[in-house]
Amino acid sequence: MKSRKPTLEKINPEFGSSMLVRKHNIDAYRGEVKPFWHFHPEIELVYVNKGKGKRHIGNHLSYFNNSQLLLLGANLPHNGFIDRLTINGSETIVQFLPEFLGEQFFNVPEMEGISTLFERAKNGILFGVKTKSKIGKKIEKLPEKEGFKKILVLLEILHGLAKAEDYTILNADGFAFETEPQDSTKVDFIFKHINENFQAHISLDEIADKVSMTVPAFCRYFKKVTGKTFTKLVNEYRVVHATKLLSESQMSITDISFECGFNSFSHFNKLFKEFTGKSASKYRSELKLVVQR
């Protein structure tokens, strides 16, 4: 196994600032290094106004089409979010330590809502269309602000998110994730291997050998750090890719099932319904009725 950089990511705010704010457009992602499995002590706010990609946050896997607004708590492992930005699309990322305004700032009664928001964010929060429309533009303007005004705008954004009712907790099962750098490096390698090879058969012997473990030891390790079996996670990658193809292509559902690495259409249908709560045909028909924002 090749040596890899530690996946405890170090966030460096700009000089004179207590937070890091970055905005990328479509050109910034051309030739960029692929996303990797990582964590950091900072809370992360992510807004994509026009883009498509896969979300892998803690134990959660899904595909998004057009836009998304996420709040990720400190030390919540996650992968990158962009497959590609669309024309005029951008991604704004805000990262800050929970105590960036002081140890006790968010413990006062007036900040109770934001403090509760930070607690929810430990499992990852995905916000709905109403909140995206209301808060997204404020997030996009944050890179233009400086000093005191930047702090005020961020607090206003957090206050709005704390009051939002249209949100989903992405890791509602409450599984506790390993955040040791050495574990994350190994898991990053495994996830990258799955991401690059899920359309083919990946045997337990193959993946265990790649990380220099026996199959029983690998199975125990993988379940411990992800909360899932290896086979279950590979199948979830396949189903998430199927949702992407159902959204973006005109391929038949049968062709999509085989394109995603399933060798049985009935098995694909069963797992797709287990994962999404609906059949692939119903999923596609509902997509046609939804106007993405």
Image: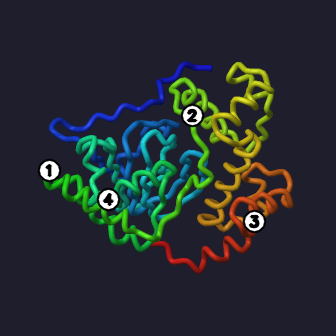
Amino acid marked by disc 4: Leu
Residue extending furthest toward the front: 109
Residue 239, image quadrant: bottom right
Q: Secondary structure at mark 1?
A: loop
Residue 8 rendering spot, x and y as whole percentages:
45, 30
User: Quadrant of the image for the C terminus?
Assistant: bottom left
According to the picture, the residue beneath numbered tag 1 turns out to be 146
Q: Earlier in the sequence, mark 1 or mark 4?
A: 1
- Residue 253 - label: 3
The residues bearing labels 1 and 2 have C-alpha atoms spaced at a distance of 36 Å
- In the rendered structure, which disc, 3 or 2, sits on the residue that comes first in sequence? 2
- Image position, residue 42 (x, y; %): 37, 41
- Name which residue type carries label 1: Glu
Q: Earlier in the sequence, mark 1 or mark 3?
A: 1
> Which residue in the structure is indicated by mark 4?
158
Q: Amino acid at mark 2?
A: Glu
Q: Secondary structure at mark 4?
A: helix
For label 1, the crowd category at 10 Å Cα-Cα, with few meaning under 14, some 14 to 19 and many 20 or more, is: few
Disc 4 and disc 3: Cα gap in Å?
A: 41 Å
Residue 13, given in percent of the width and then of the height, sits at 25, 38
Label located before the other in sequence (2 or 4): 4
Please report contact status of discs 1 and 4: CB closer than 8 Å, yes or no: no
166 w.r.t. 217: above or below: below
The circle on residue 178 is 2
State the residue at coordinates (86%, 61%): 266
